[in-house]
Amino acid sequence: MTLIAFMGAMEIGLIFALVALGVLISFRILNFPDLTADGSFPLGGAVAATLIAGGHDPWLACAVAAAAGACAGWLTAWLHVRLGILQLLASILVMIALYSINLRIMGAPNVPLIGSPTVFAPLIDADGANAWLMQPALLATVVVVAKLALDAFFASQAGLSMRATGANARMARAQGISTDRMTLLGMALSNALIAVAGALYVQTQGGADVSMGIGTIVVGLAAVIIGETLLPAGSLWLITLGTVLGALLYRLLIALALNADFLGLQAQDLNLVTALLVGLALVLPRLKRSLRSGKGTAS
């Protein structure tokens, strides 16, 4: 693998690290199975691409995309806590609705951004020669800021209340915590992060496409699971760090598989490689536990 290909894998990995952090909030912190990610990721991309193509500031476009994603996550949680719809079904309903909403926002199946200013433009030379380095550098900065902000939030009173809601909602309510409010806030925060990832993704790819969110939740879950395998559960800052590292490792493994000539894999095999890696990520924790129990028995 060349250095350019490696940095390209890291670039996509950093974007999906934001997705993974969002999935961590819904699946691990709140214990809320959420498929809204497959709709909020392209929602963020659609909003950002439409605004940027219309001449608006790219950072403002990212902020609006985050707000749109937060609304999507809030709606999923509202369907559950106010109308009593099953968590998974509520997220599926919102995900399906977002497909049409994204088409409405873009006005077409895709919106090109070739030649439009992006958040990376001030850092990139006129000939684009340093884009391979500067784009991952900026994305790494965004991911670090997002991770540290989440660490600080979950150490606060509101964050502890949210963690208590996911750990034991009945006990949290007995302590006077509004679990419904924490669920609404947590789902909004989760999907805001995922939408920001979509907004940054379209700016690296040169455009938005209505189908670009397919499989987003799978990638996010794989990153979370790989991160849990890499760094055993401990303090929250370790969990978020493991999630970021899991996303980077996941994309690196995909790039290595697709660039390994002896495997004979091509771009159209991406979904196959993804399925295999996700399956491996799901099996790894069990193998790890088996090895530990085996060592304990031997001793």
Image (spheres, helix red, strand yellow):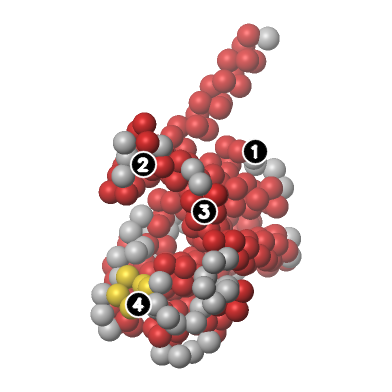
Q: Is residue 96 visible?
A: yes
Q: Look at mark 2 in the image and give the residue it sits on.
A: 273
Q: Amino acid at mark 3?
A: Ile
Q: Amino acid at mark 4?
A: Pro
Q: Amino acid at mark 1?
A: Pro
Q: Disc 3 or 1, which lies upstream in sequence?
A: 3
In the rendered view, does 234 fall on the left or right side of 270? right
Q: Disc 1 or 4, which lies upstream in sequence?
A: 4
4 or 3: mark nearer the eye: 3
Q: Look at mark 3 in the image and give the residue it sits on.
A: 4
Q: Secondary structure at mark 2?
A: helix
Q: Amino acid at mark 2?
A: Val
- Give the residue drawn at x 61%, y 21%: 292
1 or 4: mark nearer the eye: 4
Q: Look at mark 4 in the image and give the residue it sits on.
A: 112
Disc number for residue 232: 1
Q: Disc 2 or 3, which lies upstream in sequence?
A: 3
Residue placed most toward the observer, 35 or 120: 120
Image vertical order of residue 37 relative to residue 231, above or below = below
Residue placed most toward the observer, 141 or 278: 141
